[in-house]
Image (spheres, rainbow, N blue to C red):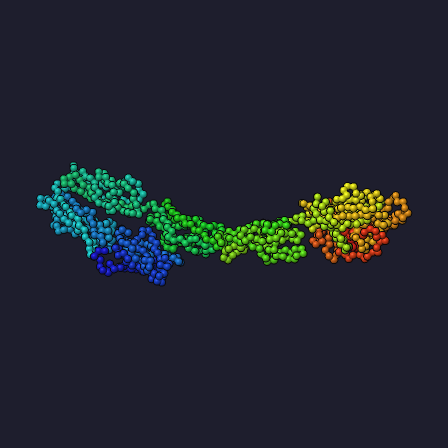
């Protein structure tokens, strides 16, 4: 710093202003201030505590050209960081004001600051040349003649640039400085006394320019004045000042102006040429070229209103006389602004990502907008595209905030590409834009959602433990932990009531994998125990707080053929002998026949006609559907015995009339098979004793109280037409009477069954088994399931419906006189006597509605 500065000036800031105008802070600092000079103490001005400036990241953001001022990290003060030169920053502009923004983060605050760099007298006046030669003709140059001189220039402003001129002592010359509001200062050398070349041919003078600074600085230029003889008329311009307006986008070669001068002399003293002797700024001599013969001034480069707004050129017209005489004029070129600068947009601060639950009005970014043009060309309008969900708010001139105008949803849009557009007021207008990417951060605002409210799952029984039954999937559109879903069974009321087991929780049957949603079986499922299992599966995300979704699962157990047919025990509570062998159809039946089993007995009379029902086999299957559809076959003897069994009814009947040649006893092996895949079966061995008709009747009456082996029910038999003995005739008469009685009783019971409601037949003290048999097949269910299934109303007349009521056994009947034959087994039903209807299954014909 120059020694001319006072000690107080060199220490710190000359003037510091703290004024509030439109919300701005203003400081003032002199140029050439020492590095480290404190411009302003921002923490105190902003009301911050000690140490807050660095913690809250106090920093400066410049608008436009950056000056050498920065924020001290420790103290937060605004200090000079490098050399400040007002002339370099602002040129001749006054005042020299620099705009900057002070940013405070955590939370974000912005303070506009205007810094004024004041001028000091650090530039001396400077003439364009150190020496100037001037020629003056004697005699013709009369006192009072004025010769324009190039004045000095001073880079300073204000008083420091107020120049005054002095001329070294001379009796012939003086200097005259003219100031006007319209033009710049004009400096003239004025002749005060006529020249005499013979006395003084050359005058050497020193022109001194002094500025108004304290202390004042000076510059000098030597004037060499040559006194010439002869030519006594100088060229005269028709205008002393030429004013021209030229748009800054004028093309190269444009004619700016044509200057014109006249000389009353004749001959060579009249001929002249034009010369541009001075320009302000100096670049004008290269940009505006003067034609020396025609006086045309043409543009040879590009104008820029934002750099130089006007040019001033001094033009001299010199004749060819001896000595040559000259005239002078001034050309003022005013550059007109055109809209050739698009707006500029800068992002000064950006706070991203923005949480999707951010409130409306949240500031996302700070932006600065400027345009170098002036007037309407420099007025800028800004907006955001697309128009939602963000908007712009103007904080002060050229500064905007990008704020949130609508609620965000990351699941709909995870990031926004926002474009801040700016348009000036020129014609045509120019535009600029700045892209800002605003990512949206996730919050847990979506609960997991299953694709179905109810899932239906089919699972075969006897599945392996751990077998996968289904896969459930819930969608959560959140991301990261907020979208990570885990699955679980909800035990709140879900479960199943199993036959013979009671209520059990769903978790005892199935489980759900927490990660994959895989539904798997905890244990093998049994259709006979469980048919339908309904439970709820919950999906919970890992957000804070966690959100829950649920779905209902209906698990249907599909039946497998895992139960063989079983013959029913005696309906009347007999001794309980079960002559059954379980197995599967095919060769396994033959192996089963070799097993030891209790032989079942039944009675048949010789002479019984073909089609006579001897007994009925009753069997059930714990499975369902085709797996419980039973059919009956005679395994031994095949195709040559006198008996057959109904394929689906289980009725054992005669194929032909029984004869004495058939022997006293017939042994039948009956196989009961289901329709499953593979089918399962059970076998029963039936021994039929062939007796006289009377003996058969007596044996049938005493079968219920006999203490001997179980005997199958006796079927009604007719008398043989070829009976020869008298005892046979007696038994025949008895048999006819018995048959007549049974027929009458059957008709009465049939009529009662037709008139009585169906519900009366099915009533009982305990669950009953309803079995419907027809030509199509026999469907049966276990007593434990207490189910019923009957054929359609269109079934044939020969269909039978069997109902087993839970009634107490009948009173004992006196034993028959003939005890040589075992008592028939109670496993088979009889229709030979109404006495058995109360304790044995009741057979009622399922008649067609047509009857």
Q: Is residue 137 visible?
A: yes
In this view, the residue in front, 509 or 64, is 509
Question: Compared with residue 21, is residue 563 higher up or lower down, i.e. above or below?
Answer: above
Query: Residue at (71%, 51%) from the top-left corner?
Result: 781
x then y, percent, for residue 786: 71, 54
Left-right relation of 356 to 61: right
Task: Choose top left, top right, bottom left or bottom right for residue 239.
Answer: top left
Asked which quadrant contains residue 287, the reply is top left
Q: Is residue 774 visible?
A: no
- Foreground pick, 257 / 225: 225
Residue 245 position in % (x across, y down): 29, 45
Q: Position of residue 142 (x, y in %)?
A: 13, 46
Whether residue 679 sits left or right of residue 321 in the image: it is right
Residue 255 image-quadrant placement: top left
Residue at 28 percent across and 58 percent down: it is 37
Left or right: where does residue 530 sit relative to residue 122?
A: right
Kindly identify the residue that appears in the image at 31 percent across and 52 percent down. Answer: 66
Report the front residue among 220 and 34. Answer: 34
542 or 52: nearer the eye? 542
Q: Is residue 458 left or right of residue 96?
A: right
Q: Position of residue 655 (x, y in %)?
A: 80, 43
- Residue at image location 75% in from the left, 50% down from the top: 597
């Amino acid at each position: 710093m120059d020694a001319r500065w006072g000690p107080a000036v060199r220490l710190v800031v000359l003037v510091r202003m703290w004024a509030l105008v439109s919300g701005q802070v203003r400081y003032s600092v002199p140029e050439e201030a020492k590095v480290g000079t404190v411009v302003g103490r921002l923490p105190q001005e902003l009301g911050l505590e000690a140490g807050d400036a660095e913690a809250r990241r106090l920093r400066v953001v410049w608008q436009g050209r950056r000056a050498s001022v920065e924020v001290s990290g420790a103290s937060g003060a605004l200090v000079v960081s490098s050399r400040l030169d007002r002339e370099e920053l602002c040129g001749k502009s006054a005042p020299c004001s620099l705009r900057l923004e002070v940013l405070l983060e955590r939370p974000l605050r912005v303070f506009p600051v205007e810094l004024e760099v004041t001028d000091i007298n650090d530039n001396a006046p400077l003439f364009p040349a150190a020496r100037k030669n001037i020629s003056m003709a004697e005699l013709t140059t009369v006192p009072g003649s004025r010769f324009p001189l190039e004045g000095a220039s001073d880079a300073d402003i204000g008083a420091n640039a107020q120049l005054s001129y002095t001329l070294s002592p001379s009796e012939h010359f003086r200097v005259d400085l003219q100031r006007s509001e319209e033009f710049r200062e004009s400096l003239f050398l004025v002749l005060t006394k006529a020249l005499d070349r013979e006395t003084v041919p050359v005058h050497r003078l020193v022109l001194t320019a002094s500025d108004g600074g304290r202390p004042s600085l000076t510059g000098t230029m030597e004037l060499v004045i040559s006194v010439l003889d002869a030519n006594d008329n100088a060229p005269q311009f028709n205008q002393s000042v030429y004013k021209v307006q030229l748009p800054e986008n004028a093309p190269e070669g444009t004619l700016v102006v044509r200057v014109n001068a006249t000389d009353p002399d004749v001959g060579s003293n009249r001929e002249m040429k034009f010369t541009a002797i001075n320009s302000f700024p100096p670049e004008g001599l290269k940009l505006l070229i003067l034609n020396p013969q025609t006086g045309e001034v043409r543009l040879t480069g590009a104008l820029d209103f934002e750099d130089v707004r006007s040019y001033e050129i001094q033009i001299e017209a010199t004749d060819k006389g001896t000595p040559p005489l000259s005239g002078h004029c001034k050309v003022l070129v005013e550059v007109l602004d055109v809209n050739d600068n698009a707006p500029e947009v800068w992002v000064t601060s950006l706070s991203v990502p923005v949480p999707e639950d951010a409130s409306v009005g949240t500031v996302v970014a700070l932006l600065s907008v400027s345009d170098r043009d002036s007037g309407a060309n420099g007025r800028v309008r800004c907006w955001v595209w697309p128009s939602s969900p963000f908007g712009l708010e103007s904080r002060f001139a050229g500064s905007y905030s990008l704020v949130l105008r609508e609620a965000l949803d990351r699941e709909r849009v995870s990031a926004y590409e926002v474009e801040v557009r700016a348009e000036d007021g020129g014609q045509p207008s120019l535009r600029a834009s700045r892209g800002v990417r605003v990512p949206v951060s996730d919050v847990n605002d979506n609960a997991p959602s299953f694709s179905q409210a109810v899932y239906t799952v089919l699972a075969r029984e006897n599945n392996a433990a751990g077998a996968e039954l289904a896969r459930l999937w819930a969608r959560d559109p959140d991301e990261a932990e907020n979208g990570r879903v885990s699955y679980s069974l909800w035990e709140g009321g879900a479960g199943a009531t199993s036959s013979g087991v009671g209520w059990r929780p769903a978790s005892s049957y199935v489980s759900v994998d927490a990660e994959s949603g895989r539904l798997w079986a905890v244990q093998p499922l049994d259709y006979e125990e469980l048919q339908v299992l309904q439970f709820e599966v919950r999906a919970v995300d890992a957000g804070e707080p966690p959100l829950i979704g649920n779905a209902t699962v209906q698990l249907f157990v599909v039946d497998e053929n895992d139960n063989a047919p079983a013959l029913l025990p005696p309906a009347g509570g007999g001794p309980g002998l079960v002559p059954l062998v379980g197995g599967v159809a095919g060769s396994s039946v033959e192996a089963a026949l070799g097993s030891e089993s209790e032989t079942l007995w039944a009675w048949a009379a010789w002479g019984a006609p073909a089609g006579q029902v001897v007994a009925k086999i009753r069997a059930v299957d714990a499975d369902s559907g085709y797996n419980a559809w039973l059919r009956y076959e005679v395994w031994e003897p095949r195709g040559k015995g006198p008996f057959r069994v109904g394929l689906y009814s289980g009725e054992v009947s005669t194929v032909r009339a029984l004869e004495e040649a058939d022997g006293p006893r017939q042994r039948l092996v009956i196989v009961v098979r289901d329709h499953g895949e593979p089918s399962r079966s059970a076998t029963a061995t039936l021994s039929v004793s062939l007796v006289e008709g009377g003996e058969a009747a007596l044996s049938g009456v005493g079968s219920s109280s006999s203490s001997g082996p179980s005997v199958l029910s006796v079927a009604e038999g007719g008398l043989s037409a070829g009976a020869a003995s008298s005892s046979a005739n007696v038994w025949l008469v008895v048999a006819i009477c018995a048959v007549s009685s049974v027929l009458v009783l059957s008709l009465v019971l049939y009529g009662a069954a037709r008139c009585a409601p169906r519900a009366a037949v099915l009533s009982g003290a305990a669950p009953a088994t309803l079995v419907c048999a027809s030509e199509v097949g026999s469907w049966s269910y276990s007593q434990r399931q207490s189910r019923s299934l009957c054929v359609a109303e269109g079934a044939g007349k020969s269909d039978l419906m069997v109902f087993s009521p839970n009634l107490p056994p009948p009173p004992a009947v006196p034993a028959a006189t003939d005890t040589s034959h075992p008592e028939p087994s109670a496993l088979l039903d009889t229709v030979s006597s109404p006495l058995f209807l109360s304790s044995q299954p009741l057979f009622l014909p399922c008649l067609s509605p047509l009857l």
